[in-house]
Each structure stands twice: as C-alpha cells, then as structure tokens.
Image (spheres, rainbow, N blue to C red):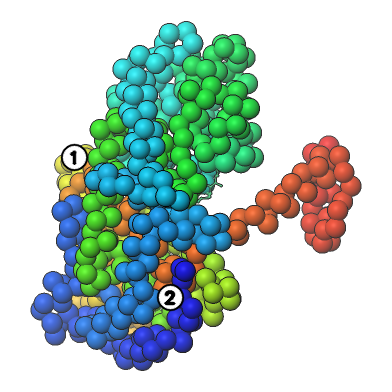
Amino acid sequence: MFGLAKEINKSKAWKRLEHQAKRMRKIEMRDMFDKDPERAKKFAVGLENIFVDFSKNRIDERSFAALLNLAKEAKVAKRIEQMFAGDKINTTEHRAVLHTALRNRGNAPVYVDGRDVMPEINRVLAKIKTFSEAVRLGKFTGQTGKKLTNIVNIGIGGSDLGPKMAAEALKKYWAKDIRCYFISNIDGTACAEVLNKLDPETTLFIVCSKTFMTIETLTNAKTCRRWLVDALGEPAVAKHFVAVSTNVEKVAEFGINTDNMFEFWDFVGGRYSVWSAIGLITAIAAGYENFEKMLEGAYEMDRHFRTAEPAKNIPVVLALLSVWYGNFFGIRNHAVVPYDQYLCYLPAYLQQLVMESNGKSVGQDNKFVKYQTAPVVFGGAGTDVQHSFFQMIHQGTSVVPCDFIVPAISHNEIGEHHEILLANVLAQSEALMRGKTLQEAAAELKAAGKSKEEVARLKKYKSFKGNRPSNMMILKKIDPHALGMLVAMYEHKTFVEGVIWNINSFDQMGVELGKQMALQILPELQGNREGTKHDASTKALISLIRGLRK
Ligand code: G6Q
C-alpha cells in the first residue's frame, strides 16, 4: 500500500500549520534576523558540495517544527524507503520507481519482482563507457572513416530536457572537437536548422525514446535518416545512428542495428532518466569519467536523503517549504534562478520535473484532492532575468518564492565578472527579504536632494514590501559531482511534495488528451477526412488554416 488513507488536509498536523501560518503572516523576516543572531546557522544545511541556506523563509522554530510534523504525518521516511526498495509506488502504472538504482554506486542489490536489476544496469553502463570512449578516440567512426564529432540527440520531454540540461551544464568538460545538438520539436524548423549546420560524414545521431513510439521523435529521426542516406547511402545508418530505448522491437523496425542500442527499463521514468543511457550524449561529450562522477554526486544526495534527519534533510526541507507556501500562504508559483550560464537549461528541466510529476488533482486514495498541488515553475539565468521578471518578484502583487543557485568559483574567472555575479545573487535574496520601507524610501529620496513634494509623490513607487522568501544554494563549482547532487536534490524534493500531497508523482496522464485529439485533427487538416465532432471554434480554425495553406 502506498499513499495515505486519510486526507492530509484533515490531519492535526495540517490544522496546526494553518494556525502557524496565521501567526507567521504577521512576522517580518527582517525582524526575525534582528532578534536572532543564530538564525542563519539554524536554518541551513551544508553537504560536501552544496550549501543550502533556507533562513530567508517565513519560518521560525515553531512553524518549522510544525512542518516537520507534517512530514511525519505523511510518513515521508517510510515512503523514501519504499521508493529505494523498488516497491511499485507508481501505482497507476504498477511500476517501481528506481532512477536511484541507476546511480547506486555502492552496488548493493536492488530487486524488482525478485530480480536484482544491478547487473543489467552495470552492463549498460559498461556499454556506455566503451562506446563513448570509442567515439571520443575516433575508434568508432562514420561510414567514410571520419571521426564523429557532431553528436545529435533526437528525443523529446524526458528524452531531451535531461540530456540537454546536463550536457550544457558540463560544457566546460567537452572534448575540444565535439559539438552537441538537440532536436526535439516536431516543428520542421528544429530539424532543418540543426541539419543545415552539419556534415553527414561526421554526424552521429542518438535517437532517445523510452517507448520508441513518440511521434515527434520518430518523425525527426526519419527526416535525419533520409538526410544521411541521401548523402551516404543506406549502409551508413549502422555507423551514424544509435538508439536509447526500452523497446528492442521498435528500434529494429526503425532500422537501427540493435547492437547499437542502449537499453533502459520501465522502472525509470522519462523525466528521471538522465542517469540512464539517455545521458549518452553527456558521456560522449564530457567523457565517461565525468558522467560517472555525476552519478556519484547523485548517489551522495541519495544517501543524504535516506539517512539525514528531516530537519537537516535538504530535499525534505525544500519540499516542506514549498508545501508551506502553496498550501498555507496561497502562493501558486516558484522561480528557479541559477546564477551560472552553464545551468541555463535547469529551469526548463525543473519545469517538467515538478509540473509533470506533481501537476495532478487525484490522490492515491482515488479522490479529487481539495488542496493545491504543484506550483507554476519558471525561471532563467541570473543576472539576465533581473532585467526581465524580477520587477514583479520585488514589487508585484504575487509573492514568488525563489531558489537561487550559484557556484562560488566560476569555470571562467575573467576579470571581475564572477564577483559581480556573486554580489548580484546575494543582493537579490537580501533585497527580497529586507525590502525597503516607506520611511527608508523617503529618507533615500530626501538624501538625493528631492523636494518634499517629490518625496511624497515617489516614496511608494520606490518602496519594497520585502518579506519575500528565497533559498540560496551555493556550490563550490559546477562540476559533474555537484551537478549530480543538485539534480538529485530536486528529484527528491519533488518526490516528498508528492508524498505529502498524496499523489502519484510518476505518471503523466495529463499529456494524453491533446495527443489523442491531434491524431484526429491531422487527417482533417490534410483534407483526407471531413470533420469529426469539434466545437465551432476548432472547426473554423481548421478550415481557416486549410484555406491559408492551399
Ligand atoms: C517524462 C514523460 C515524457 C517522455 C516523452 C518522451 O517523464 O514520460 O516527457 O519522456 O514523452 O517519451 P519517449 O522517451 O517514450 O519518446
């Protein structure tokens, strides 16, 4: 049995939190900092490679204790063990959830239906090692004997966002002559713009699809195949195409030699698959040792998650804070702002992780939930986004809790760049927390020589309410180990949120309806079938587009 039988919002722990939130609404963070010199130490956790300061949140010891009590009520510790043990916690699809086994560097057996999955995982890892090294050394070459230096990942959703985020994050580690490309969208432009840059003789395509049935990926793969065959002939496919999938038959049917196939398993969800062969492009570009270091980082976070007490357990604490704002302060969004260019795809990756995992309305008890689940996640790289949506984060009517992520040392320490970047991220979180009172704004205007009238007219515009929460995550450097820790931290945070909300974080049925309807509309757009039942708007749009395309 997974999930809670009783509705969590009817529990004593929940009621206590409602009471605590009412109390905390009247308390300003800046006052809590003034009163308690130990606050920064109390609400922070440091692990080897990552330091998380969560003291700039609207919590004190009592409210934090009440949050920890909610984790207890939701049986978080037990659920964590059930996940690691391979219990079928993806209850709607009756599957185990074992992305943690992919990075189980201790190699202790992990059982699914009585079978240890570690030997299979290790076999595929060895294959990734051999193949990635052969490509990097130019031992596995293209049809004409040239080195394969352009690596193209064809995949979408979980088969794109993870590898794209990880490969970009580790760009500094790429072999000098290797370039990575990603084709995901069905929009022909995505394919055309990548292919235009490439030379077939030096291009390797990795077709990533768990099911090998996804229309975008198969259509893109077919187009790339045709492009290659037109240039180099049919036999070239075996030297320029590999596949990552759970579906051997479909891979063979597509015409990829199954010797060139890297397997993964249905106990790995798409958005949790970057640790599997789906991460092949990262292993090729950054080297297998670095891919392995990323797994080791994730493994370290796994051990922390399994063993640390809840108050010092980073993913548990982050999840509780998210629940705190979402369910007790009515806050509906969350921003992720990495201050590191190499992490520019992390917000998009987390958008899927969080919103596809927890954007659900039906609980494990088969009832519609009566509380908010996943927030809207958005973000972008700092300092860029300071010049776009930060206006709202500082002065808008919605409160947006932020995660700031920054390395102390940059891979590119040029002049003062990194110090300016660091000063900015620290300033943002302090500014959000402290704000600027009307009196402070007025005093500042006066000091700048403004007239009395101008001070009175401008002080509200220049004031900041403050008391806006953020977490600060400081990494030493964005290296493979730290990246592994960071990503695993977010996976586990998402899991704990799902446990508390009593939902299954591992299915994604909400993506199906639109897909089904697109299949109906396609022949109608192509003029091969006349309208099935549509609303008047859809009908008119189909006919308008048909007219425009004539
Ligand atoms: C992720 C989802 C989804 C999936 C894509 C691609 O958790 O399941 O984003 O990764 O739909 O699916 P395939 O890998 O099967 O092509």
Mark 1 sits on what residue?
414
CA–CA distance in space, label 2 to label 1:
40 Å
Question: Relative to residue 228, is residue 349 drawn left or right?
Answer: left
Question: Relative to residue 354, is residue 135 drawn left or right?
Answer: left
Q: Compared with residue 499, is residue 7 higher up or lower down, i.e. above or below?
A: below
- Between disc 2 and disc 1, the foreground one is 2
Three-letter code, disc 1: Ile
Question: Relative to residue 360, is residue 386 drawn left or right?
Answer: left
The numbered mark, 2 or 1, whose residue comes first in the sequence reads: 2
Q: Which residue lies furthest to the front in this view?
A: 114
Question: Relative to residue 475, is residue 487 drawn left or right?
Answer: right
Whole-percent x, y for residue 128 in the image = 37, 30
Under 8 Å from ligand 1: the CB of mark 1? no
Mark number, residue 326: 2
> Is residue 440 visible from the viewing direction of this image?
no
Whole-percent x, y for residue 130 in the image = 34, 24
Q: Residue at x 50, y 75 (%)?
A: 372
Q: Where is residue 20, by image quadrant? A: bottom left
Q: Which residue is drawn at 32% across and 91% down?
A: 23
Three-letter code, disc 2: Gly
Whole-percent x, y for residue 39 in the image = 15, 77
